[in-house]
Image (cartoon, rainbow, N blue to C red):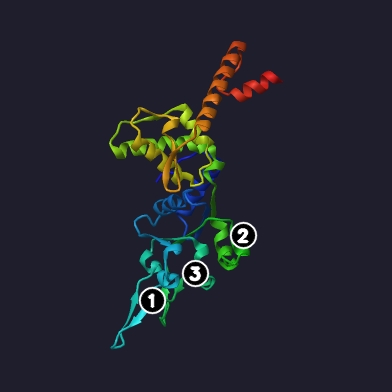
Amino acid sequence: MEIIGSSKTISSATVKAQALAFSDEPALLIGESGTGKTLVSNLIHTGGKREAENIVIFDASKCENIEKGLFGTSRTNLIGIESIVTGAIDSAGSGTLVIKDLQKIPIDTQLQLAATIQLGGYKPVGADESLRSSCKYIFHIERAPEKLIEEKKLVPELFQILKKNAIVLTPLKERQEDIEPLACHFVKKWCAALGRSDKKTSKNAMRLLKKYSWPGNVNELQLTLLNALIHFSADEIQPEHIQLKLDGNWQLHTNEQLDEIALEDIIERKLKQFMQRLGKYDVENLHKAIIERVE
């Protein structure tokens, strides 16, 4: 799986993920929802020796009994025969276990996980004997681990094990240079999925995408472009095709936002014409050219 983007943080995350793919050590991915933690987890799994094994995703926020969901349970029937109801660790086998929302796991269970990682064994709920754990662990959290420790939502013992293999994925608004390659990738992807010829994104539409804060990060950008392709049939995506999903409904940008983009375009075009008349300046790097002229 390819990670799209050339920003420093994404490049660093990709290099770390590729290195971790050949390691048995657990990893910790830190980043807001939609920043690509699952994608990086898949890269770690498929990029190394566990590629042919299972990858199991355990979402702690959606499990009623987390301890049983992770470790499984032991049951004894009427004639005294014990059987194990499989948990996520057993399901992962020698593959990869991705545990999302680590901070939602009770403190006692986090301590059990720390012991499992260090000792290589675990006990299903109600069992007398331990089972072997041979999977690779990848944990996800959405906030700074130090803050979660302070709030008693993350045990320091587990963080000490994970911190040396931590990967931070910054919000999309903090890596604006990744928005254009991501947008181009998603437009191409959705055009192929919808059976349509490739479309381009206009310069003003791209400028609008770069101005938005993207609270839903990469996931929101992807859905926004899919919505534009589904509901508008123009050959090129324009600013008026870019809608945001607010309160469950897709809504157009305001006229004020579109006017602001149009004004920026006029200013940039006029400045380029001015700098071209002066000559000897690279108008593609307008900011640098203006600074040189002012100095």
Q: Position of residue 44 (x, y in %)?
A: 44, 53
Residue position for label 3:
113
* The one of 176 and 264 positioned closer to us in this rendering: 264
Evaluate whether residue 244 shows in this view.
yes
Residue 274 image offset from top left, x and y in percent: 60, 14
Q: Position of residue 181 (x, y in %)?
A: 46, 35
Q: Is residue 103 found left or right of 93 in the rendered image?
A: right
Residue nearest the viewer, comparing 216 with 291: 216
Give me the disc on residue 147. 2
Q: Amino acid at mark 2?
A: Lys
Of 131 and 212, nearer the camera is 212
For the residues bearing labels 3 and 2, Cβ distance under 8 angstroms = no
Residue type at the position of mark 1: Thr
Q: Residue at x 39, y 46 (%)?
A: 1
Q: Earlier in the sequence, mark 1 or mark 2?
A: 1
Q: Earlier in the sequence, mark 3 or mark 1?
A: 1
Could you tell me the amino acid type at mark 3? Leu
- Residue 100 placement, left or right of 285: left
